[in-house]
Image: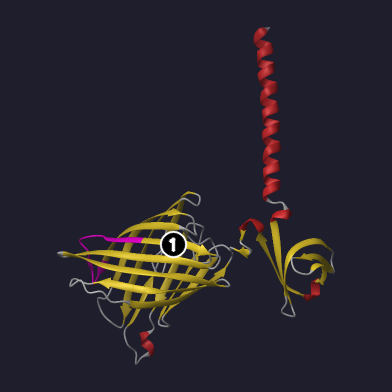
Amino acid sequence: MLRSNLMKTISKRCYLSTIITLLLTVSYCAAQNHPDSLIYLIEATDGNTYKGKILAKDSVKILFESDKLGEITILKSDIKKIQTFDVNKVKDGKYWSDNPQSTRYFFSPNGYGLKAGEGYYQNVWIMVNSFAVGITDVFSIGAGIVPLFLFAGSPTPVWFTPKFSIPISKDKVNLGGGALLGTVLGEGNTGFGILYGITTLGSRDNNITAGLGYGYAGGDWAKSPMINLNGMSRIWARGYLISENYFIQTVGSTQVILSFGGRWIIKDAGLAFGLVLPVIDTGSLFAIPWLGITIPFGNK
């Protein structure tokens, strides 16, 4: 009898606990998707833009509460585009959009990957062209070219860049691995490339990455690995600080290439700028300017 009553009590408590858990889950999901957490940016066909909240809408018009004009009515036929933003990403009156170029620094990749259907095109100093696209959420493929064939048919470097990206802990730890596999068209025995593995700690906005890779050229593999240390920090709504650094083991010495600069977000595109500082054996230091633009495309 005592055992029976005990089992009934436990059963009731488990039932009550389950109900409470379900209610809390529903409440949490509702809060996460509550329209009050969203703001809208409406771009009209006449070029004007309006930011605020949608109060009501029908098949013809939208009743809109603009942050500057108050309640206004906008005909749907006058709307060119509507974007939705999370109000929690508004800081100091500015919207901090998702990082449009979160998978690499100046050139080197990190542990984050493109989602299926996402991609980007990158151009550095006009001549260096590359792109990548996500095949799945964990695998992407890219390619690049320096079109020297435009100059009297000169030999032309081309390369391919397969990459795997594996999230270990959301926004905290990501692992990656891949390769840069290239050759020079118009020349014989000019294969080159690198196989690498990387670990990224931090979010897509603020992170550091350590990488290790083995390069090859002309059929010969490097006897020592190349070490890659990079970092990215978001300092304002549209600005990032970036550092990308290489430590290359050669016979009897270590070659060091340092770089410092930033990325400025222009709408969805990213303009990267900085200085590349090769440290040569003599200890001399000189700077090479870096200027490139990355344009994302596909699903966002």
As for residue 221 lying within the magenta part, the answer is yes
Residue 134, x across and y down, in percent: 50, 63
For mark 1, give the secondary structure.
strand
In the displayed structure image, the side of residue 10 where residue 173 appears, left or right: left
- If the image is split into quadrants, where does the N terminus sit? top right
Residue 84 placement (x, y as % from top left): 68, 63
Q: Residue furthest bottom?
A: 152
- Image position of 179 with respect to 77: above or below: above
Q: Quadrant of residue 48?
A: bottom right
> Could you tell me residue 151's position as x and y percent?
36, 91
The residue under the point 51% across, 57% down is 137
Task: State the residue lying farthest toward the front.
Answer: 92
Tag count in the figure? 1
Q: Type of residue at label 1? A: Met
The residue under the point 43% across, 83% down is: 126
Question: Coloring scheme of the render?
Answer: secondary structure
> Against 169, is 162 above or below?
below
Q: Looking at the rendering, in which quadrant would you find the C terminus?
A: bottom right
Quadrant in the rendering for residue 213: bottom left
Measured from the top left, where is residue 231 in percent x and y? Answer: 40, 61
Q: Residue lying at the far left in this picture: please name it.
A: 252
Q: Which residues are magenta?
A: 216-229
- The residue that mark 1 highlights is 232
